[in-house]
Image: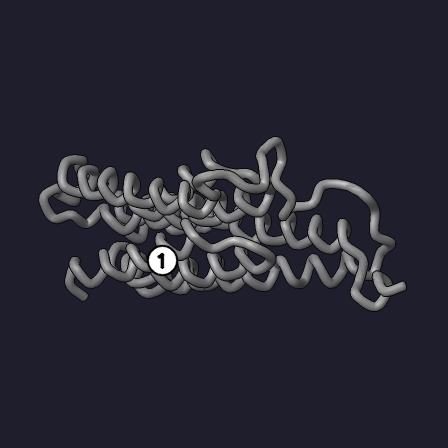
Amino acid sequence: MNQPLLDLIAFAAGSVAVVVDRRRAVLVTCIAVALGLAPAAAIYGGGWAAVVVLGAGAAGAVAGPLAGSIAARMRPRPGLDPLRPVGAPHEGLFGPRSARVAAGVIALIAASWVSFNVPVGSVAPVQGALFPVAFIFTCGVLRIFLARTVTDLSVGVVAIGLAVSVGWLLRAGSGPLPDAAGVIAIVPVAGAVEGWLAARRHPPASEARP
């Protein structure tokens, strides 16, 4: 697979991580970013690396609904709503998604510069091979920086966890695969925490009706 195609796939995945929100944001991010980084992981670390990345994305996508279904069986309690803004107004001249899109443009410029100027391991910077990792990592960092909700934080953590693990493979090939798998384990944890909080905060629809 040539580098421009890898970059295009990663750009699409990072764009999803930047703009997605609401109830299924973490689930969508897990799937999109895992699919976006799997080709790069396969090239840098081999087939098993791609399996680990895809498996982490699938685990993160399943962990949230699974934790939510368990928490929904318990009595709802008032507490932190992962979708409710904390310390931020609901409306403004520039909404939260507009700010994230602007941040995505910054991430694109920064990742392009990094991929052509920063060597990683044995990969020469002129190849631009670092762009998929750099772009999605930067999108995750900016998503956390602009976070208004716990869901925003979870989306950023998922993107960063997947990007760091693939960057680890890019630096040293398939050797550090166990270490990369340890880093990527944060993805299902983030999904489970967000799903648990959402289900514990809101009662089931059948109980919410008068």
Viewer-proximal residue among 152 and 134? 152
What residue is drawn where x is 50% and y is 48%? Answer: 155
Viewer-proximal residue among 83 and 177? 83
What residue is drawn where x is 27% and y is 51%? Answer: 132
Q: Mark 1 points at which residue?
A: 13
What residue is drawn where x is 47% and y is 55%? Answer: 20
Toward the right, the furthest residue is: 210
- Indicate the position of residue 65 as horizontal and vertical percent values: 65, 62
- Indicate the position of residue 14 as horizontal and vertical percent values: 35, 53
Residue 100 in the figure: left or right of residue 66: left
SS class, disc 1 = helix
Residue 205, quarter of picture: bottom right
Q: Is residue 59 above or below residue 119?
A: below
Q: Can residue 178 be seen in this view?
A: no
Toward the top, the furthest residue is: 87
- Indicate the position of residue 21 as horizontal and vertical percent values: 52, 53
Residue 82 in the figure: left or right of residue 186: right
Q: In this view, does 18 lie above or below 60?
A: above
What residue is drawn where x is 23% and y is 56%? Answer: 7
Toward the left, the furthest residue is: 126
- Which of the image's four quarters has the N terminus? bottom left
Residue 61, quarter of picture: bottom right
Q: Can residue 190 be seen in this view?
A: yes
Residue 78 in the figure: left or right of residue 120: right
Q: In this view, does 146 lie above or below 70?
A: above
Q: How crowded is mark 1: few (under 14 residues within 10 Å), some or many (20 or more)?
A: many
Toward the front, the furthest residue is: 93
Q: Number of callouts in the render? A: 1
Check disc 1 and give the amino acid type. Answer: Ala
Viewer-proximal residue among 195 and 42? 195
- Indicate the position of residue 38 as horizontal and vertical percent values: 34, 61
